[in-house]
Amino acid sequence: MKHFYVAIRFRTKNFILFIKKHFQILREVRRNEEFIRSAYFEVYLILRYLFPFLFVVYIPFAILDWTDFLKNSGYFPLLIYNSIFIPGCFLFTALLNFPILKSENGRRWLTIAGTLFLTSAGTAMNLLIFQFGTDISLFAFTQLGIAVLLRYPDRTKKIIYFTNYTVFFAAMFWLGKNSSFLIQNFFFTMVMTILLDLISFLTKVNSFHKEQSIRDLNRKLVMESIKKSEILRIAIHDLKSPVTGILSLVGLYTREPSHISPPNRITSSYADPPEILEHIDRTSRKILESIEDVLYLASSGDAETIENQTQKLNPELLLKSVTCNLNFLFTSKNIKIEDKLSECNFYFQANPQILYRVFDNLLSNAAKFSPENSEISLKSELISETYDKILIIKIEDSGPGFQPEDEKDMFREFSILSAKPTGAESSSGIGLALAKKLLDRMGIRIRLGNSETLGGAQVILEFPQSKAK
């Protein structure tokens, strides 16, 4: 028994705190301009749908009233009511759905007028049918429906339905329908209307408060994301300077003069670079390229760069050039390049530096995931469609290829797929994401799959002739 009392006391306390919290939120949002605008706009939208529905639905009832009037002239007040209610619904349908009033304040007054019309119509209808039977169900239905549906942020609605209750209560006595049964029903309906109005409004307040909290949290997360992205961009950009410095220092010991070398230095005095310096040079260039990749991903202005620096080029010739420049990479793993490019006379409008970067990225990936003493195949074909010609280039390797679970993450930034590099290479997970982003901006389609001949990954690039300008 003791545990029962403890549980009751605990739940009662929680309920009181719950109600207190919601009323506190209610006091806060009543002064919130955004909440007031959203609440009035919600009522405005409900009335936009409600009035056309009432207009269409009530027409058959009006026809029945007209038929009854032909049999009994006592139905004449209902005809007058119909001649006001139906045009009124049509008028508010037109005003709400084809608005003449553009200002927010004008729409607010129109919303209040529509609510007043609905509640008054319910009251008038019930007073008219009193002579046919003592019932307040239609009046109750109207007031309760307004209380639940139209969640005003102020006391406008309360004034409207309290006015209707006053008119209806006075009419009950004037018409001599003041039986104790009707009076009890009347006050019960009024209490239920007030209660449902408050409950409905509290749900509106609670949902708005949650949405506002989510909006504030999203705004905070966006600001933090922008701040972190900016810091990352600055940090990556600052990394370029030391890497460029390493390349310059390595250049002092290579056969090719560095751009920072003293002008009076004699080229012939340069010594042959040790092998370690060549590794430093290649590694530094890779780091620099990775930095550029991340900067491309973080930048939002690449589209303009791509469009403003395009020229007509042959994708196959550019791919051959990239393959030659990566020969050191293929040689280090004894990878054979099988060139099956068709060498067709096809030109495409693109940024050569960016397309070179994409080819370099894809070929480097093919070498990275291919085992030693394997093969990489380059194929191309020109196909004709109804309104266009498309050059298809395929890059296939002998690595593990793609697994079914890789499909959803193939082009996602910083995602590591199932395949692992076969040497000591590192994988950042941004290569394919960057390639997809850049190719999309140039109008080139990229598809990934597995090679049927070599068993590894297959990258298919589609260059449409229509982009050749």
Image: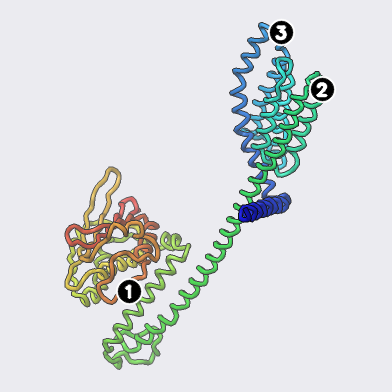
Q: Which residue is mark 3?
A: 73
Q: Is residue 188 above or below residue 396?
A: above
Q: Nearer the viewer, residue 103 or 81?
A: 81
Q: CA distance from mark 3 to mark 1?
A: 94 Å
In-image side of 244 versus 324 (left or right): right
Residue 1 screen position, x and y as percent? 62, 53
Going 41% across and 85% down the picture, which residue do you hit? 260
Going 35% across and 77% down the picture, which residue do you hit? 285
Q: CA distance from mark 1 to mark 2?
A: 90 Å
Q: Secondary structure at mark 3?
A: helix
- Residue kind at label 1, given as amino acid type: Ser
Q: Is residue 332 above or below residue 393?
A: below
- Of labels 1 and 2, earlier in sequence is 2
Question: In the drawing, what numbered circle is on residue 426?
Answer: 1
- Of labels 3 and 2, earlier in sequence is 3
Crowd around label 1: few <14 · some 14–19 · many ≥20 (10 Å): few
Q: Residue furthest bottom?
A: 269
- Residue kind at label 3, given as amino acid type: Ser
In-image side of 414 versus 70 (left or right): left
Q: Secondary structure at mark 1?
A: loop
Q: Secondary structure at mark 2?
A: helix
Q: Which residue is mark 2?
A: 173
Q: CA distance from mark 3 to mark 2?
A: 25 Å
Residue 105 screen position, x and y as percent? 72, 42
In-image side of 119 versus 341 (left or right): right
